[in-house]
Image: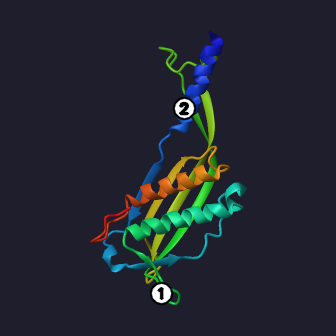
Amino acid sequence: MLRLRLLGIGLAAVFAVGCATMNVSSHVERGIDFAQFATYDWGPADPLPTGDPRLDNNPFFNDYLTGAVERQLAAQGYRRAESGQKPQLLVHYHANVTQRFEVHGVDRSTYVNCYPNCEPEVVDYEQGTIVIDLVNAATDKVVWRGWAQDNISGFIDDQERMREHIEKAVVRMFELFPRREGTTGG
């Protein structure tokens, strides 16, 4: 019986961490008319490492992320500036991986979530954060910032799952992007 209870607790912990919802949000600079922008290009690369060599040394991470962003910008009606043409928007991204811990408490009065010996459970996981900035190239001011945070444990070492996760994060961020007239969005 104790084995079954421990197995159930372990599965519940994996399920709870694995199903955590992605946190996505954005900020739009007030008073910006996005219809004035038609072209974009990538700004200088972020000089800061992600904090995880599995991403910093991964040639596919940058490709997955830039490809996902470019697809969303194209869906919004933006086009990449041609060689020699000054873009109206510059795109920057920042990525970070941090170790996180969550403590799941115990309600001893009802023994809800009571783990062996009614001790709190500590769950550690890797949290990935992606921030995408769109900068007005004429003023050098950020006009839109989108960000996504999620549990990425087990994704970094699996290229296909990483690609799918990045795509999902970027799509969800751009769902919050201001629509331009005549586009359907991402």
Residue 15, label in figure: 2
Residue type of the residue flagged with mark 2: Phe
Q: Between residues 4 and 30, which one lies in front from this camera angle?
A: 4
Which SS class for mark 1?
A: loop
**Can see residue 175?**
yes
Observer-nearest of 67 and 93: 67
Q: Earlier in the sequence, mark 1 or mark 2?
A: 2
Q: CA distance from mark 1 to mark 2?
A: 48 Å
Q: Is residue 95 above or below residue 30?
A: above
**Image quarter of residue 183:** bottom left
Residue 98 shown left or right of residue 165 in the figure: right
Which residue is tagged 1? 86
Q: Quadrant of residue 179?
A: bottom left
Which residue is depicted at the point 34% across and 74% down?
A: 34
Which class describes the residues within 10 Å of circle 1: few (<14), some (14-19), or many (20+)? some
The image shows residue 57 at horizontal and vertical percentages of 72, 61
Residue drawn 52% across the image and 61% down it: 131
Residue 52 visible here: no
> In percent of the image, x 62 and y 20: which residue is there?
7
